[in-house]
Image (spheres, rainbow, N blue to C red):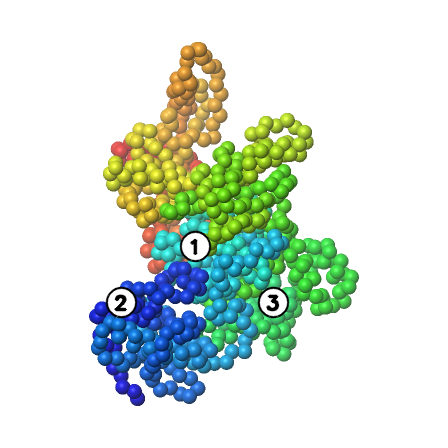
Amino acid sequence: MPERRLLPPGSARSGRQGGTAGERFGVGERKKGSAFRRYGGCPGWGRARGASRGLAALKLFIRRPQVARRLAEQRPSGRCVLLPAPPSSFKIRKAICTSPIGTALETRARMLRIMRKFLVNALKSSSLCNEYVYFRKTKMRVVSVTQQNCSLRSYSSAPGDVKSLRSVINPHISRIRNIGIMAHIDAGKTTTTERMLYYSGYIRTLGDVDDGDTVTDFMVQERERGITIQSAAVTFDWKDYRINLIDTPGHVDFTVEVERCLRVLDGAIAVFDASAGVEAQTLTVWRQADKHQIPRICFLNKMDKNRASFTYAVESIKQKLKIKPLLLQLPIGEAKTFRGLVDVVTKEQIIWKPTSDLDDGKNFEQKVLLETDDPNLFQEVQDARNTLIEQVADLDDEFAELVLGEYSENFDLIPADKLQSAIRRVTLAQKAVPILCGSALKNKGVQPLLDAVTMYLPAPNERSYGFLQWYKDDLCALAFKVLHDKCRGPLVFVRVYSGSLKPQSAIYNINKSCTERISRLLLPFADQQIEIPSLMPGNIALTVGLKQSATGDTIVSSKASAAAAARRAGRDAGGEKRSTSDVESLLLAGVEIPDPVFFCTIEPPSMAKQQDLDNALSCLQREDPSLKVKLDPDTGQTILCGMGELHIEIIHDRIKREYGIETYLGPLQIAYRETILNAAQATGPLLGFPVQDIDVTVQSLTVHPDTSHTMISACVSRCLQKALKKAGIQILEPVMNLEITVSEDHLSAALADLAQRRGSIQEIQSRQDNRVVVAAVPLAETMGYSTVLRSLTSGSATFTLELASYQALNSQEQSALLQKRMGLV
């Protein structure tokens, strides 16, 4: 056995001598979420701070031999002491350095020589198996490098060959796919997106939501909470197709993010937890996709999860979403036994066989399923294919003629491409929805999902947009999202429907009736962008220089172009006489923003910071149209209105982190409504909330020539206040749809708690081993509910809330609320 010695002072382990550990290793740190990981560039030779970062660099190079190859070509030779191992493989248990104590420069040179020898030896293996789980901070794990032969098919780019964003292809519009990923919270949207980027070759390593290092969850708040808060756009290519993908949030507080993204997308992937099926927010985003008539495919994720059931998930989709599912895949195994899937169309089985503990899902075995392989599975696939053919034939006349004519005797003879073309037509017509399965976390099923995106979802020119006939070849684009960059100012996401955009070109905003100039065009990749020379129809990109444009604004090339489109629209309206403003309103494609249900006061630490706070809130409102800010006329306080507790909490945190303002929030309040009980002639409503469900008839109005508009408004307001008081005011409170997923053991405790919160139980469903409680509960009773529910169920239950309606308070509750608001209790 070779002699074991401690690392010398000044080396990476001790960190006691001059020069940083990064300098001694000659490498820089790969930070989570860094450009190095995203774009696959060579690691910088810059300074890394502290000994732990030097170790981080060493661990990085142990895990990535392709990077080591570049290092080995540039660094001087040296040696490394290895522990003995069997002839079939060699194992590196520790890097044992033999170096005398010397100057920082000498130590660095010796460490570089050691590193090169170690890395050259590591290159002899074809893959890395890890006996470690993950490198955390400075803890050194045991690493083994074993030599193996891989004969499986590679479905991705060559190892280490990471594409640059500048290599993204710019194909014909028919080979562009604008898609979004939508789902209930924690169904696996971001993980699926991360795998897509990895297999398409645009990131070097697989990020993890729990570790906070995924590409699309780049906000600090997202990484801390492990959830998606704002939508993120990425652009990549897959098999000569360009895919513009938007990862959307799943939390109910950020539903507007989903709405405005679906407005500009051509297709969507609905992700489901295979153990839960259709959940509360799934229904919401599905209705949003129905509203915009977006073709979809379903991906049953988490097939490896305990209690995952393909049959249950499909049945849940059929019953709750009221659609016709087309089973294009069947899983091979479920839960812990899930190891692959069978393509029902081609009757090929795809099995992922890990070649090492570091298996990333790139290599798998794909072959035709034979009856001798698994008779039961073969018969199941045969039956599923026949059912699929019958379903498609019922929905597509062209395919029905083919089946009843040439292939009526034997369905097995129907070519796969004919069946795929028919499935595509049915999907685009939204008559049925293809169903696929896999496990994004375990790296199974994502590549076939990408194939399905290119095969079954529409290109931009296959979508029907009525307003395009008015613009012809002129520019028509929609601004659907705004971000603020400290250096570049507002960054506006636009989707181009016709015409093209170029830097330094002037555009006309119909909504704002103003002309602006685009200084630059950027291709988005989450929080990173690269500059592009132009933007063609069907694509999505970022613009720099638009100071006025906001979500929902229609952008055209000039005011004359808008007027010409308005004239064409007027002629198409059957010769009816319409004003220009009426026609322009037909051209605008806005996003419906629901009213906030929570509000609270927000105050700066001092009056000197008030202007900074106003500027921050103005920027955040432009980014997030569901955030409302108003000024209380009585107290002069700033009121922050949001969609939920989490929404307001995130806004508060962003003001602190991004704008450096320590603000103070008042207690959360409920956004009530008021109405009248009886008709009356004559505010103030009781609490100063908006009044709804009333009609106002003006009996008479006398105006003198010298009467100002302000005096008229004040008179009408006082008259209306008197009328409302005579009519009798009724307070309406927001009532939420509540869905709780809880185990059988904790069901009674959850129901008892709901009864104390004025909850009304509507239904109790079964979801495998769990129970799903569907109830209606006043929003005022849900304050702090998440903490209480976790306590009652030992952290096992989950719940979702969605605004259902406003309902009248009874007299006792209304009296108690009035006393509370007046400070009497």
Q: Quadrant of the N terminus?
A: bottom left
Q: Which residue is mark 1?
A: 528
C-beta proximity under 8 Å, tags 3 and 1: no
Mark 1 vs 2: CB contact within 8 A: no
User: What kind of element bears circle 3?
Assistant: strand
Residue at screen point 43% across, 64% down: 41
Compared with 473, 796 (above or below) is below
First in sequence: mark 2 vs mark 3: 2
From the image, tell me which residue sits under label 2: 20
Element under disc 1: strand
Task: Give the residue displayed 44% in from the left and 64% down from the top.
Answer: 40
Q: CA distance from mark 2 to mark 3?
A: 54 Å
Say whether residue 802 is left or right of residue 666: right
For this rendering, which residue is in front, 568 or 327? 568
The total of numbered circles placed on residues is 3
Image spot of residue 672 (x, y percent): 39, 36
In-image side of 791 versus 442 (left or right): left
Query: Distance from label 3 to label 1 (Cα)?
Result: 36 Å
State the quadrant of the C terminus: top left
Instruction: Please tell me in which quadrant of the rendered image residue 30 appears.
Output: bottom left
Disc 1 vs disc 2: which is toward the camera? 2
Q: Amino acid at mark 3?
A: Asp
Which numbered marker is on residue 343?
Answer: 3
Position above or below: 402 against 647: below
